[in-house]
């Protein structure tokens, strides 16, 4: 992270306006925010800027309105929710658009104000990273702070274009994300164990190909493990399996072997004939003993023991994706046990455990393990792209 400017480098900001890109793309039901994690994660940055005397203007997207005003995707309810989290008024810039009217509104507000602009994706130029829109956004203030790691995989006007115009800084939660990720894959303490689960190999090919060149051990779980097992000639019955990706799976195993990356695949599994919670005929069996009418729904106890041994060997763990159908009991067993095993070791200071990406946070919360992980990213797609070894445009722009 040393090659980024941080808020501390901005000096005194009295009389100045700081434009802050946050990720307020929060879950919402009936016009109310149902999980305020992302709102709370913006607090350190907003407070630090206000302490330095800045007027704070927040830019955020919500949903995918595709350049049009979609009333259900207004950020108005989010302004109310953020005001509660902040414990101070948040002024919502309604109907200001993205031009001169918006900057006039910001100028008209007092210096101690926190202002939330309307959904950046209502502006047609946002997702096109239109330079004119980026310039209009830049005209709202004096400095730019990006605190939205989870939107940094998008090269949009509010995440990338604007950073090239104004003096730009990483916000506190951006800084925390980047520092944690650097510890996990950038300059990790070895050996590094990656745990990758989830339904499909097809959505994680780039990720797997990158990981096997970087980590010492890779444990593959969830539906995607079936594709690897089948590619090695193991019969997986009617399991979820991408048979057409057998060559890709073998190629990944090949790259792993060339890079001395040890692959851990399930040795035993939980199977059932129906995809259903408490399926009456569920049983544990060795891989290779799955009947034609059965499907693999979780990893088995022997697999778990092997995974825990790998965790004992490892100094660093990076985790994405559940190991089984964790939304159906008892097929959450391996995910819960492995998450708790990792959390234990992290809490005892034996393992740096970092996790992120979509379902992963839900799985770790379900296991009540998230709190003891060293770091759990709030990012979905951005975390995956980072694990794929891709440059994130929002992060790159801060380096310039
Ligand atoms: C997210 O919620 O993952 C980020 O806010 C990015 O949203 P997007 O996938 O619509 O770009
Ligand atoms: Mg997304």
Image (cartoon, helix red, strand yellow):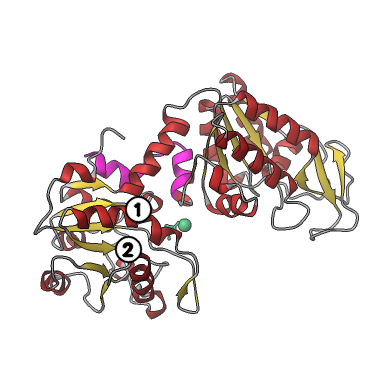
Front residue (pair 177, 400): 177
Write the start and end of the magenta stretch as one range. 382-400
Image coordinates of residue 384 in percent, x first then y, are: 49, 45
Q: Is residue 274 above or below residue 30?
A: above
Q: Quadrant of the N terminus?
A: top left
Image coordinates of residue 199 in percent, x first then y, are: 66, 49
Asked if the residue under mark 1 is in contact with the one under mark 2, i.e. CB atoms within 8 Å, the reply is: yes
Secondary structure of the residue carrying numbered label 1? loop
In this view, the residue farthest toward the left is 15
Res 72 → quadrant:
bottom left
Pointer 1 residue: 148
Q: Is residue 188 above or below residue 331?
A: above
Q: Is residue 327 above or below residue 169?
A: below
- For image coordinates 86% across by 55% down, the residue present is 273
Residue 244 vs residue 76: left or right? right
Residue 187 vs residue 400: left or right? right
User: Does ligand 1 reach within 8 Å of label 1's beta carbon?
Assistant: yes
Q: Quadrant of the C terminus?
A: top left
Image coordinates of residue 138 in percent, x first then y, are: 16, 58
User: Disc number at residue 60?
Assistant: 2
Front residue (pair 267, 181): 181
The answer, for residue 359, to whether it is visible in the render is yes
Q: Does the magenta segment cover residue 114?
A: no
């Amino acid at each position: 992270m040393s090659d980024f400017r941080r808020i501390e480098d901005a000096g005194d900001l009295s009389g100045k306006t700081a434009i802050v890109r946050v990720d307020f793309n929060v879950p919402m039901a009936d016009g109310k925010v149902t999980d305020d994690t992302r709102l709370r994660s913006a607090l350190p940055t907003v407070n630090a800027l206000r302490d330095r005397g800045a007027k704070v203007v927040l830019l955020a997207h919500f949903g995918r309105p595709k350049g049009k005003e979609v009333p259900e995707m207004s950020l108005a309810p989010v302004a109310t929710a953020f005001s509660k989290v902040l414990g101070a008024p948040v002024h919502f810039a309604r109907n200001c658009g993205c031009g001169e009217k918006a900057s006039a509104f910001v100028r008209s507000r007092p210096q101690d104000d926190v202002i939330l602009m309307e959904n950046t994706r209502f502006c047609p130029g946002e997702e096109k990273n239109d330079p004119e829109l980026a310039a209009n956004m830049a005209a709202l203030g004096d400095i730019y702070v990006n605190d939205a790691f989870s939107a940094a995989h998008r090269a949009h006007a509010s995440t990338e274009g604007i950073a090239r115009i104004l003096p730009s800084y990483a916000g506190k939660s951006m800084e925390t994300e980047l520092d944690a990720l650097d510890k996990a894959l950038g300059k990790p303490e070895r050996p590094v164990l990656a745990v990758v689960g989830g339904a499909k190999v097809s959505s994680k090919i780039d990720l797997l190909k990158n990981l096997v060149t970087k980590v010492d051990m890779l444990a593959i779980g969830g539906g995607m493990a079936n594709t690897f097992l089948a590619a090695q000639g193991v019969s997986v019955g009617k399991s979820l399996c991408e048979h057409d990706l057998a060559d890709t799976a073998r190629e990944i195993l090949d790259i792993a072997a060339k890079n001395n990356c040890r692959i851990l695949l399930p040795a035993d599994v939980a199977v059932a004939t129906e995809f259903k919670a408490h399926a009456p005929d569920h049983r544990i069996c060795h891989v290779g003993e799955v009947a034609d009418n059965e499907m693999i729904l979780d990893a088995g106890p022997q697999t778990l023991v092997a995974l825990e041994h790998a965790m004992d060997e490892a100094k660093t763990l990076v985790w994405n994706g559940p190991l089984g159908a964790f939304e159906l009991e008892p097929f959450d067993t391996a995910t819960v046990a492995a998450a708790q095993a990792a959390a234990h070791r992290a809490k005892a200071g034996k393992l740096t455990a970092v996790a992120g990406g979509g379902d992963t946070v839900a799985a770790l919360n379900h296991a009540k393990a998230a709190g003891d992980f060293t770091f759990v990213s709030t990012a979905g797609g951005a975390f995956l792209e980072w694990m794929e070894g891709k440059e994130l445009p929002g992060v790159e722009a801060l380096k310039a």
